[in-house]
Image (cartoon, rainbow, N blue to C red):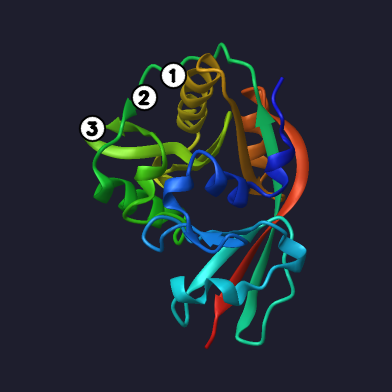
Amino acid sequence: MHNYAPLDNPVWHALQTTHKAFAQGTDRVQRYPADTLQFVGCADPLHADLNEILPWTAVGEKMLMIGELPALPSNWALVRQLDCIQMVCDEKTPLASPDVVPLENVEEMLTLINLVQPGFFYKHTPLLGAYYGIYQEGQLVAIAGERTKISGLIEVSAVCTHPAFTGRGYAQQLVAHIVNKQVTAGNALYLHFLTNNDRARKVYERLGFRDRRAIVFWEIVRNM
């Protein structure tokens, strides 16, 4: 039986467990490296002082917090609030994934993701976990991979398809591949999507994902 409680504060728990080697910051506020993931997590989010992370940030840098947001010091500002649904899955799916291949070309990944989901993928993001894709006539047209990782829990992320190739089930194949691989290894999966993304919800529900909770991504910026 998996313990999903850490998913209420996933960034912090990832940086304390599987992704501890990526952690930058203090014993109360930590982040991923800027060229890997713009995420910050806090041991006690509602009472955290984000200025503890100043030595590891730059003026003008935008970052994301998931879950609770602390009171922002005067030199930080809220940019936007992204209302999301968090889903989990702990069973394999019978859906096939015949065209999925591991990805190694970071530039290809960056080009596709920045076309579809700009601002959430960086040069060293692929170091966080395995990424997979589908090619058509030599062109990478769909991608999905593993982002934050907590002991026994793997986040599915970067699920995107080139606009010219949507509607062909590629996202479903990719996520199915990750689910089956990780469940076989004894892990459970989690993911996030915007509350108004009904198309994504239908794909994930077909694969056996179920709602865990509503959760907010807070985009904040250090302005001085």
38 lies above or below 164: below
Q: Which mark is residue 145?
A: none
Q: Amino acid at mark 3?
A: Glu
Residue 221 in view (yes/no): yes
- With respect to residue 191, does 72 lie above or below? below
Q: Position of residue 148 (x, y in %)?
A: 52, 44
User: Which residue appears at 54% of the width and 60% of the height?
Assistant: 30
| Residue 38 image position (x, y, % from top left) | 48, 61
Q: Which residue is mark 3?
A: 137
- Nearest-to-viewer mark from 3 and 2: 2
Image point (23%, 32%), residue name: 137
Q: Position of residue 69 (x, y in %)?
A: 72, 65
**Direction from residue 29 to residue 165 in the image, left or right:** left
Q: Nearer the viewer, residue 209 or 20?
A: 20
| 150 or 218, nearer to the observer | 150
**Relative horizontal placement of residue 206, taking residue 164 as reference (left or right):** right
Instruction: Classify 216 as above or below 89.
Output: below
Residue at figure coordinates x 32%, y 46% from the top left = 109
